[in-house]
Each structure stands twice: as C-alpha cells, then as structure tokens.
Amino acid sequence: MIMQLTIQNRLTRLLKNAIKTCVDKNYLKMSLPPFVEVEPTKDPSYGDYASNIAMMLASRAKKNPRHIAQILFEEFHDSEHILERIEIAGPGFMNFFVRKEIWTGLLAETERNHLFGSLSLGDGRKAQVEFVSANPTGPLHIGHARGAVVGDVIANILKMSGYTVFREYYINDAGNQMNNLGMSVWLRYLELLGIKADFPENCYQGSYITDLAREILKNEGDAHLSKTPEEVIPLFTDYSANSILDGIKEDLRAFGVTFDNYFSERALYASNAVSRLLDVLGKKGYTYWEGETRWFKTTDFGDEKDRVVVRRTGEPTYFAADIAYHQNKLERGFTDIIDVWGADHHGYIPRMSAAIQALGHDKNALKIVLVQLVNLLRAGKPIAMSTRSGEFVTLKEVLDEIGKDAARYNFLMRRSDSHLDFDLDLAKKQSTENPVYYVQYAHARICSIERMAIERGYNVPCYHDANLALLKLPEEMAIVKSIARFPEVIEGAAKALEPHRLTFYLNDIASLFHSYYNKHKVISEDKDLSISRLFLVKAAKVVFRNTLGLLGVTAPERM
RNA sequence: GCGCCCAUAGCUCAGCUGGAUAGAGCACCAGACUACGAAUCUGGGGGCCGAAGGUUCGAAUCCUUCUGGGCGCGCCA
C-alpha cells in the first residue's frame, strides 16, 4: 500500500528539521523537544496549518516565543516547495500558507478511486476488533445496534488506515445465563404440552422463548417429556442458543455487519485454554489461593482490588475465560486489540488491562471503546428494555421501520461514549430531513451533474484533462482543501478510534458543495472552466462515496 | 460510602488530546427555483462553556473543591 504523506505530516517533518538545525547550530540552547505539532487552523486568515512550537519551547530555550519563531523561520527550508509563505502571528504562532498548486495537485490522488484515503498508518499490523458479543439468549435489540455499527465502522477505518483487520464476535455461550435459557424454553415446552409449572421471574420472558419451544415440539414431539431436567436442559440450551445465534447473524447481515469469526467461550473450555491460562498466571506468581478460591493479583497492575478467577465451587469465573480469550488473541498475533463494550462495563477495564500486562504485553496492546447505551424513545417517551423481561425493540424492527442507512448514520452522529436518545417516531417522521439524506443528496446531485454533462457532450474528466488553475473562487478552494484533507480525517479517526469524525466531516463537505452548487454553475458556456469544475465535483464524489462506504451507508446515484 | 463518565445556544450535540474572535444541526424569523435536482441555498437573533478557586504566555479542555445527572462497585455475564 502506497503511503501518500499528508501535508500535515510533511510540514511537521520540515519543522522538525528546522528545530534540529537550530539546536545543532546552537541557535537554540536546548535538547530536542519530544513533540512537534502542526495542526490545521480554524480560520483561513491564519493560514492552512499552524504550529505552536515556539510557545512550547519558550521556557525550554529561555527565549520569548516570537523570537524563537523567527529563528525557526530562518532555518525552515521548504525543500519540497510546499509553501507560499510563513507568517509569525499572535503570541508566536507559525502560520503556514500552502501553495494552491499543492492543494489542487493532491486531487490527483482521487484517481485512485476507492483507495483514496488509504493510509499506511497500520503498516499491515494485525488489528482485531471484537464487538457486539451479545449472549445468544435473545435477539439483538437497539442497544446492541449502536455497538455493532461503531465496531463495524472502526474496523473499516482501521482497514483503510493500513491495518490487517479481523472482526470477531465473542459468543458468551457458557455459564448460568445459558442454563437459564434452556430452562426457560423447557418450561414453555412443558406448558405447551399442558403441564402447568411455575415460570420463574428470572427466566426469559420473551415470546421468542415460546416460539423456540414450539419449534422443538413440532420437530421432536413430546420425546423430551420423560427425561429429567439434567438430561433435557442442555439439549434445549444448545438448540435455543444455536437458533438464536442464527437469528443474530441474520439481523446483523441485514444491518450490514459481518464478522470474520464467531469465537465460542465454550470452545475455550473445551480446549483447556482456561486451565492453561491459570497455570501461566500461577507460574508467574500472579495468583494465590484463599481456601478453595483462587485470586488474580490485578492490584499489581493498578486495579483497586484483586479478582476471583476460580470460584469456591471450582468453576472458573467469566473473567478467567475472558483472560484466556484475550491470551488467545495475543497468541494469534494481533498487535492492536480493540474491544467495543457497553459503557456499563467500564469498571471492567482495569482488570482486563491488568490481564494483558500480566501476560507480558504493553497495556496499549488493548484498547477499549466504550459505547453508551441507547435511550430508546417512542413519541418522546422512554421504552424500558430488558432482555429478560422480553420487553425490547429488536434491531430487526428498527431496520424495518427506519432503514439501514438512517439507522447507521444516526448511531454515528455522536461520540460513541455519549448518551444517545433514539426516538423511533422522530427518526421515521423526519426521515426526509434526516442528516443522512443531506449527504446522500450531495452525492446524487453530483451524479446528476455528470449525467447532464454527458448529455451536453462532455466526458467525465480525469485529473489530466482539467486545468485546476482555473478554479479561482474561494468556494472552490474550500472544497479542494476539504477533499485533500480526507486522508488526515481518516488518520485522526483511526488514531482516536472515533467514527463520528467521519459524519461531521461529511456534513461539512456536503455543506460546502451544496452552497457552491447553489451559487455557481458547474456546466457553463466556458468549456475549460466546465471541465475543471466537473473534475472538482467528481473528486468530491469520490470522497462522498468512500466516506459513506466506511460508514456502511449507501451512496445513491438518484434519490 | 468509593471509583469512572458527563454538564457547552431554547433542544440534540461537536470542539481534532492546552491555542488565536467557542461551532454545527434542529427549532424560530426573513428571503431565493422560466438556471446542472428546492431532500438545496442566503441572511438573522440567540452563550458567565454547571459554580468557585488553582496551574501558565494562553483553559470549554489540565488539577482541587462543590452542585446536579448517568454508570459501576458479585465467587453474575
């Protein structure tokens, strides 16, 4: 994969060179600074990029910032001829004004089409994104949907950033909840056969439980009637879990979410991975016994208290299995392990981090992305949801009601760790003024322009067909720069694991485009200018398509 | 009680890890189609960034305390 260094990267490098020169020549009496930053400006009058480095170095070099900026300015060699000028402004900012030709030149990159925006940030390293990972005890509901989209899009972003990405769903198919599932279905089965039994409150109440019982009854009749609970419940559990998992996979597929692997917790036990893990931890001296209970010294790694890994009963805890699972991830060679969790699990982070470290890895090998739960509303009123009570709106229902594109986009419009109110009626009612359509419309509009251009005898131009020097309007330069910065947006989103940056970026560039469209004609009597503008909007189209692609939202040619 | 997260325009939220005059979308008001698609555009009002201190050239952002919300604190998963 070819890395096109961003202008930001290149300027940073040149600035670092300047600093090094100044230090080497003793113009600045100090050691090299650990960080040098060049960041985009918010106001064009401050140039395209700016650096605060002179202010950062003020105390270090014992000179006033403007003076430092001046020294750096004199030693700054723009060997790549990127800049039009540098200004020293305010308290000591260095403002970089990039040559117009550099910006328009970057548009050549859009010829790579679906690869435009690709980075080598990950350098082929193996990243694993684990997300959803819901118990197969019931269908996915709206709360899972947000995590599904966030994980999916993070995976997409990392892939575009040059990581080898693996998506995985951890199936919590061991433990009490599963037993509970089998029991619930069995009780309903008995009920269908006319046998009255108490249906405990802690059993799963949803109607899908009865549906499963009915399926079993239909397939196998009353064959299970004579068996003991010990015999029959595991059978019911297996059948139900498999059936529910199939449904989950189907719903996820309809939502545009697929996995490279579904990893079973039970398989961990079956392969003795859990007991082997406990041996490893024990040999390293990280566990101790208290009676029959075995503890893991997570406090050695900053956790607030030690955690149980083997119960008094001799059974390993969920945590023990989860460590074994993460050990397995590490053994598979994943260098960047990303877990997407519901925010209610945040208290679990220190112990998982402790586990990674106890296994001899840097704590940065594991990154946790927290996704706040969704407050589902209908007509402004909250809908209480609980898998066990059976009162929930399923992912499938949401998809049927408001559609994949609007649903996905809505989940990506906020930071994933902030609360999200999702009003079904509102999302449906406002569907025509939903932000997703604003962006899709920009794409469709460009397609429409291209159709019109062809009708009038133009070809859709390539980079070399267009004379971009003709693009002189400030609106045009704003669009050019926005397109050219797409890789930087990807880079930022990848480093921060923040998909919402893409929706904000999309909205911004769509706004620039719509505004431009209303003010100026792309196709006019001026043939050369028309070709240039056609190329400009075509380049923008690539950005719309690629970004929407990352979000898993369609880019329609007509609406 | 202890820990984590949040508090920014009437509402919902951004603010790129400490930068220059705090932004956007809804909502409200006033305008723009005989012109490449009006699912669009243009303009307008709106703010003590929850409160008070502190750190420094500089704070919505970092530290402390307080107020008000969410979540976690199991040999559940």
Image (cartoon, coloured by chain):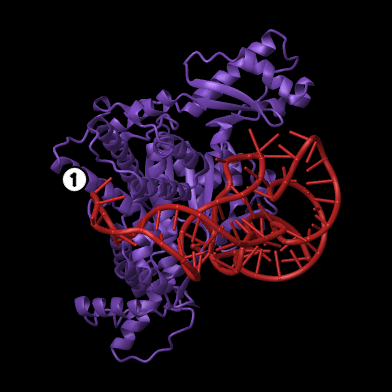
Chain colours: A purple, B red
Crowding at dot 1, Cα within 10 Å, few <14 / some 14-19 / many 20+, comes out as few
Residue at image point 76% right, 20% down = A61
* Image: B5 above or below A176: above
Percent of width and height locating residue B73: 65, 63
Percent of width and height locating residue A546: 33, 42
Q: Nearer the viewer, residue A351 or A55?
A: A55
Percent of width and height locating residue A464: 26, 24
Image quarter where the N terminus of chain A lies is: top left
Residue A519 left/right relative to B30: left
* Image: A427 above or below A39: below
| Residue type at numbered disc 1 | Met
Residue at image point 31% right, 45% down = A545
Residue at image point 24% right, 80% down = A217
Image quarter where the C terminus of chain A lies is: bottom left
* Image: A390 above or below A80: below
Reading the image, the residue beneath label 1 is A452
* Image: A27 above or below B61: above
Percent of width and height locating residue A223: 24, 79
Q: Nearer the viewer, residue A40 or A405?
A: A40
Q: Nearer the viewer, residue B50 or A203?
A: B50
Res. A239 visible in picture? yes
Circle 1 chain? A
Residue A269 left/right relative to A44: left
Residue B36 left/right relative to A348: left
Residue at image point 52% right, 31% down = A48
- Please tell me in which quadrant of the rendered image residue A247 appears: bottom left
Q: Nearer the viewer, residue A13 or A44?
A: A44
Mark 1 secondary-structure assignment: helix
Number of marks present in the image shown? 1
